[in-house]
Amino acid sequence: MKAHHAATDTSVLERAAAKVKRHVLPLFVVMFIVNYIDRVNIGFVRSHMEADLGIGAAAYGLGAGLFFIGYALFEVPSNILLQRFGARAWLTRIMFTWGAAAMAMAFVRGETSFYVLRFILGAAEAGFFPGIIYYFTQWLPANERGKAMAVFLSGSAIASVISGPVSGALLSINALSLHAWQWMFLIEGGASLVLCGFVWFWLQSHPRQARWLSDEEKDALETTIAQEQQAREALYVVKPSMFKLLADRQIALFCFIYFSIALTIYGATFWLPSMIKQMGNLGDFEVGLFNSVPWLISIVAMYGFAAVAAKWKHPQAWVALTLVVAAIGMFMSTTGGPVFAFISICFAAIGFKAASALFWPIPQGYLDARIAAAVIALINSIGNLGGFVAPATFGFLEQTTGSIEGGLYGLAITSMVAAVVIFFARTTPTNQAPRAGHRKPAALVV
């Protein structure tokens, strides 16, 4: 009888998890698509803003990167507030403020306003990505989160695929005395404002509030998630201190690894349209179409690597492999002409996008859920500083040397170093008592 009951519980849990994914994942993917487009669409208007506003390569790179400074500064506070106010209210607030900031980009008048609005946009978006990750920890059992993350992260790849053609098409609009690039910001930012209303009516903060789950399914989800957390808590002497966790060597490793991944992703994202224009006399729409190719390839790679990593469970090895692929692609992009460089970036995209998807289950498995939201926000915000370093460095190099080749070498080296460092990262917390004379791991002390 007990075995039958356990089987029934498993069936109910699987059904509940499937319902959760069907209900929230399509919305989260759409949210991520809109979010990502508003974040990176300046890559398609770089030449327009240079012609109309005099914003050169160095100023463009700095402004592109300042987004991530605002993002990093407000990421952890935003996720602490998400836990206080609930996912529904806070994710809606995030979408509204980033949509308004994205629309305001249409009224940039020079370098200073460009810097300020990019910083504000980053601050407005802060908390979105780790907020979604935290949402998964409250709604899905551990064995379902990796697959959900892979689907969610595909949103950035889908956004990269469609942002080029969409932005290229919008850059053909000229009306009401506004430049085409202004219309692009207004329309793409406005889409976020429209979507935030739907988020408010569609999401719930906790499984118990979901009318589309049966009571049995709610119980199965809440019980399983609570049991998983209790098992994790048993590995800790007391509730971990946030300040001690900040000094945890594992957290530092996670931050460095994600920084390396983000460095490569945003180095390619913000400079790829400019690299494509060197391939020939291409219009905005054609550049947008070519820009879609690496990201389309990366979607297939993300799902492929997620499938094999789920079957052969060696998470560090899979992340290392994808980082090596990214490093090879970045290095090869420096060895030929513009067309060969584009093909090499397509190869690199297989690695750095798959690495991003495969990375997150590792810190999720290590962290105590009681501080997971804040620490995931910390990892994401520090890691995303790669989005500041890469474009700012590329802009400086192009303006001073006329080439970004040195930056591409730097990305290749950083990815290779991260491929080694990932093997020092743990996937689960330690439950071993420290030996005499040795300091306790930060996760085990107050």
Image (spheres, rainbow, N blue to C red):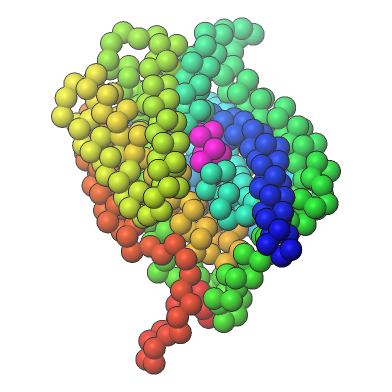
Position of residue 376 measured from the top left corner of the image (x, y, whole percent)? 54, 56
The majority secondary structure of the magenta stretch comes to helix
- In the figure, 134 relative to 337: above or below? below
- In the figure, 405 relative to 424: above or below? above
- In the figure, 237 relative to 395: above or below? below
Pick whichever, 369 or 63, lies toward us: 369
Q: Is residue 133 left or right of residue 85?
A: left
Pick whichever, 439 or 23, lies toward us: 23
Residue 416 in sight from this viewpoint: yes
Pick whichever, 280 or 445, lies toward us: 445
Position of residue 362 measured from the top left corner of the image (x, y, whole percent)? 46, 57
Quarter of the image for the N terminus: give it: bottom right
Q: Looking at the image, which residue is at 54% across and 61% down?
A: 375
Q: Which residues are magenta?
A: 149-156
Q: Is residue 314 left or right of residue 180?
A: left
Q: Looking at the image, which residue is at 15% across and 29% down?
A: 335
Q: Is residue 84 left or right of residue 184?
A: right
Quarter of the image for the C terminus: give it: bottom right
Pick whichever, 283 or 120, lies toward us: 283
